[in-house]
Amino acid sequence: MKDLLIEILVEEIPADFAYPASLSFKKIIENTLKNNGLNFKSITSFTTPRRLSILVEEAEEKSKDDIIESKGPLLESAIKDGVLTKAGEGFLKANNIEIKNIKDIDEKESFDKPYLKELNGKKYIYVKKEKKGIETKKLFEENLENIIASIDFKKKMRWGDKDFAFVRPIRNIVALFGNEIIKTKIAGIETNNKITGHRLLSPEFVEINNPKDYEEILLKKHVIVSREKRLENIINQLEKIEKENNFEAVSKNKVSEIVVDLVEEPYLLTAEFDSKFLEVPKEVLTSEMIEHQKYFPLIKKNNNKNGDLTNIFVITANQPKTPQIIAGNIRVLTARLSDGRFLYQEDIKKGMDEMNTRLAMLMFRKELGSVSDKVNRLEKNAASLIEALNYNENKDNILKAIKYMKADLVSNMVYQFPELQGIMGSYFAKEMGLGENIATAIKEQYKPLFANDDIPSNDTGKAIAILDKIDNIVAGFYVGDIPTGSQDPNALRRQALGIINILVKSQKHLSLKKLIEETINSMPKESKNNKSENLINDIFDFFKSRFENDLHFSKDSISGVLSTEIDDIYDAYLKISAIDEFRKKNEELFSNLLLVFKRVKNIIKTSNTLIFEESILEEKAEKELYKIYKEKETQIKKLIENKEYQKTFSTLSSLYEPLDNFFKEIMVMVDDDKLKNNRIALLSLVDKIFKNMLDFSSLIK
């Protein structure tokens, strides 16, 4: 057993390329060893901006010799009339065996020729080959260039006169098996056992004779080659800065995952920009620092709560602190913040009314016109939604928020920082004097952005978010751009779930089908590119699928409720919650209800036109069932009106015993048609009252 070390030294790898490439490299080495029958104890990948490395511990020096026996076709399929058939020829050719005389094929096993072997009373042709084990060192001498060429990168390049593609020019390759060099040449570079350290702090090459020493040697040469340890080092330094200054780093995890691939030995340094820039919205400053400069912005901590942004930021340097490093980073950031400040001030001067005039030039969808056309649709559809959600007191704010909600899309700031759309609009709204309610609504119009995200915090925001999202969803279906499989480039699934979450968390009742229909009617008729005969149901089914896939209820509870033609999302949610809760507490009773309703469903399939008459009832069990049904009918109706669904289902479940007794005592399919049909009609009444909550036929057991 020996250790294997391969290090590829390159010019700086782009930060977002490094880690995925190290995983690819590791997988290729692992597959190479396994596919050649070579066992090993462990495999570790390392990555820095300048190197990709693999350390395999206790790899076998040679794979075992093996005998491989291959089963071929039946004898009668391989040989006919003393001649090889195509099946026989194909089998021998695939195994690189030639045979001159068919008679030589007998039952004597041999490595030199095919032989016969009986299996389950039938004779088959077999061949047997001896596979010699391969030496690990030789395997990598012959295949290392192909292995390195196979490492996956988003983009590769060629350099000089080399006919070899890699992410960046290769400068050195270490290849060791035990203390022996794996001698080969890649991109014109001969493999060796010399490693270099940090480019500035320890650039000299030193020999390495034991792969196990790799990490320790590089650590002494100012390189933390383990990405995990480098990340831990960054977090520890950052937390020390936070604690000493009572600060909190913004987007700590996000920035850490970026800068870890920018340095070989991290040094976290603090610096200050001019406090005059703090008059610019903090989101602009933090976006500039995080997205463009890869800095950690710092905010004050007040009583364990995040406070204001400070003018102090954290640099992740690749060498110890010097005045030049601090000054250089401040100079670069100052230039960028100056640009941001200028653009923000220019946007304020223009104002949102001027921005709105330019929305006509911004395309929403080519089939449906501009963003200005979209805003006009939202204004048209607002009245009905405001009425349905009982937001009449907030009507003026909602209409004004709709008017200005997309203005920032044509601002200088959003052009530079697309992730700030909505956020910049809220600042512009405040500067324009539209008030906190409208500014907050514009800021939160895209919420919720993910499953557990907050919904908009005020009614204005909820209304414009619903209108915006339903317009996007209907627009996609209207022009035939519908999510398929894992493809959902316009995030329509997320937006459907967003509407569901807003309605549920706001406890608002709304006819979803009516909302869909009104939105469809607001679309230009000539732009429809969906041939469906029932687009409303298609979109409603799309929402149903979000219920089933993204809400944490039993799928059959969801299916059972949504199959009752309910289209009030919040009402459906309440019913599903009640049924799921009942099921958890009364598993046996619910299972029994399901069983008895399977019988009900089988009997009432053709009962649509049957009329129930109490006077026809004869037997005690059917009279008792009808009596309890009548007692519960009024009670259930009142509970449903009050939306007390847990009590509703508990009351419904009390019909189980008389229903079960009915089936034990009563024969439904009797010869007397009048009596039979009346009993079927009675069961239909019971089924109908349950359909106020769910349709048992849609449940899965």
Image (cartoon, rainbow, N blue to C red):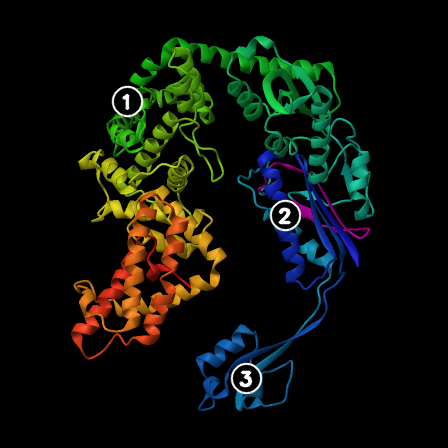
- Residue contact between numbered discs 3 and 1, judged by CB atoms under 8 Å: no
The numbered mark, 3 or 1, whose residue comes first in the sequence reads 3
Name the residue nearer the viewer: 586 or 694.
Answer: 586
Residue drawn where x is 46% and y is 85% of the image: 77
Nearer the observer, disc 1 or disc 2?
A: 1
Q: Give the SS element for disc 2.
A: helix
Q: Position of residue 540 (x, y in %)?
A: 30, 46
Name the residue nearer the viewer: 514 or 138.
Answer: 514
The numbered mark, 1 or 2, whose residue comes first in the sequence reads 2
Res 298 quadrant in image = top right
Cα distance in 3D space between marks 3 and 1: 76 Å
Q: Amino acid at mark 1?
A: Ala
Residue span colored magenta:
165-186
Tell me the residue that label 3 is attached to.
125
Mark 1: give few (<14), some (14-19) or many (20+) Cα within 10 Å: some
Residue drawn where x is 79% and y is 36% of the image: 219
Tell me the residue that label 2 is attached to.
25
Nearer the observer, disc 3 or disc 1?
A: 1
Cα distance in 3D space between marks 1 and 2: 50 Å
Answer with left or right where residue 535 lies relative to residue 550. left
Res 509 quadrant in image = top left
Res 203 quadrant in image = top right
Q: Position of residue 58 (x, y in %)?
A: 77, 56
Name the residue nearer the viewer: 665 or 87.
Answer: 665
Tell me the residue that label 1 is attached to.
360
Answer with left or right where residue 385 lies relative to residue 651. left
The number of callouts visible is 3
Answer with left or right where residue 321 lies relative to residue 385. right
Q: Give the SS element for disc 3.
A: strand
Vertical side of 140 occupied by 520: above or below: above
